[in-house]
Image (spheres, rainbow, N blue to C red):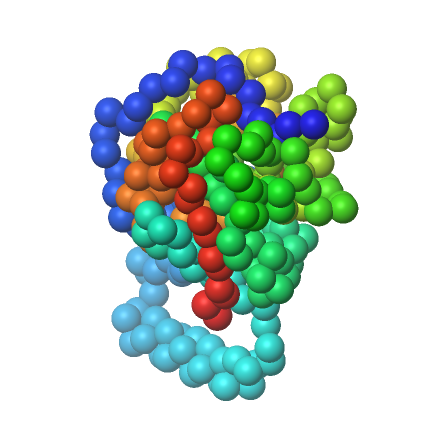
């Protein structure tokens, strides 16, 4: 079987060039839970002195908790991906914990080292993680390889620019939409409008939050993948490298003509 994404939209290039880092903005907007994530809003009726004392108390408590638990061996959340085209950084979401634990485990075991980004679509996606791609000869068809398990779907996040998502087999053989245990793709995408999101809502039977709509219109993405593939992280640095990889010359199976070899290490 071949892990592929579904061609249900026009292959368009971004008309506005996004580069560098999203600096975590996508995670803020991608949450399905309503309301503001983190932070505190000041009540205009409170006195400044009272608010200052409350903030001081909060900071003191935060410092104490950091000192108490900061060395408790919590799981890393960031991974640096090194390639012969340049480097980029991925942040994995705590909320998609099974995906995070799996990705970190594979990265720390060296599973991804020397694998290829074996599929690229210009300004749309790059895909990697096929174990059969390690030292694969030129022209070999790739995309069928996997570890011996899959991961249950988790559709809480959406496919905006920079999203990291799990590849999977087609619905015909994978009706539960379970993700590959190792293959993943990164979204570049295209500009997105309210009309496009409206159409997807009608076809799929779900509703985007205002925050999700705002981010899609700000940075673009591939909303056609929403509720079909599981987003579990985002690129926070180096999206210019991801776009560069997506634009490399490719063969008839979308494999780059020049191998793009990856290495990974966890950062925290």
Q: Residue at x 76, y 45 (%)?
A: 149
Drawn side of residue 22 relative to residue 27, left or right: left
Location of residue 88 with respect to 157 vertically, above or below: below
Location of residue 211 with respect to 237 vertically, above or below: above
Q: Residue 59's image quarter?
A: bottom left
Q: Position of residue 106 (x, y in %)?
A: 62, 58
Q: Position of residue 120 (x, y in %)?
A: 43, 32
The image quadrant where one finds the N terminus is: top right
Drawn side of residue 104 relative to residue 233, left or right: right
Q: Residue 227's image quarter?
A: top right
Q: Residue at x 62, y 43 (%)?
A: 132
Drawn side of residue 256 relative to residue 15, left or right: right
Q: Residue at x 26, y 38 (%)?
A: 18
Drawn side of residue 3 relative to residue 82, left or right: right
Q: Which residue ends up furthest to the left in the rendered image?
A: 16
In this view, the residue in front, 6 or 2, is 2
Q: Position of residue 81 (x, y in %)?
A: 43, 55
For the question of whether residue 260 can be seen, the reply is yes
In this view, the residue in front, 147 or 152, is 147
For the question of whether residue 37 can be seen, the reply is no
Q: How many numbered markers are drawn?
A: 0
Q: Residue at x 47, y 77 (%)?
A: 62
In this view, the residue in front, 85 or 240, is 85
Q: Position of residue 241 (x, y in %)?
A: 32, 45
In this view, the residue in front, 67 or 107, is 107
């Amino acid at each position: 079987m071949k892990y592929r994404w579904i061609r249900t939209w026009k292959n368009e290039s971004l008309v506005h060039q996004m580069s560098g880092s999203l600096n975590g903005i996508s995670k803020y907007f991608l949450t399905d839970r309503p309301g503001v994530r983190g932070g505190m809003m000041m009540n205009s009726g409170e006195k400044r002195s009272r608010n200052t004392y409350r903030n001081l108390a909060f900071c003191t408590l935060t410092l104490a908790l950091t000192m108490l638990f900061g060395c408790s061996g919590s799981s890393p959340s960031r991974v640096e991906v090194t390639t012969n085209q340049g480097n980029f950084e991925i942040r994995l979401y705590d909320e998609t914990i099974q995906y995070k634990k799996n990705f970190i485990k594979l990265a720390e075991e060296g599973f991804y080292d020397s694998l290829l980004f074996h599929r690229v679509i210009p300004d749309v996606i790059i895909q990697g993680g096929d174990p059969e791609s390690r030292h694969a000869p030129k022209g070999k068809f790739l995309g069928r390889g996997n570890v011996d398990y899959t991961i249950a779907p988790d559709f809480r996040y959406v496919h905006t620019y920079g999203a990291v998502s799990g590849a999977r087999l087609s619905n015909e053989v994978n009706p539960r939409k379970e993700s590959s245990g190792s293959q993943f793709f990164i979204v570049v995408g295209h500009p997105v409008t309210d009309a496009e999101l409206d159409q997807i809502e009608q076809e799929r039977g779900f509703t985007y939050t205002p925050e999700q709509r705002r981010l899609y219109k700000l940075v673009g993405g591939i909303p056609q993948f929403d509720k079909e593939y599981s987003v579990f992280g985002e690129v926070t640095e180096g999206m210019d490298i991801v776009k560069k990889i997506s634009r490399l010359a490719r063969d008839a199976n979308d494999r780059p003509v020049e191998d793009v070899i990856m290495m990974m290490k966890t950062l925290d």
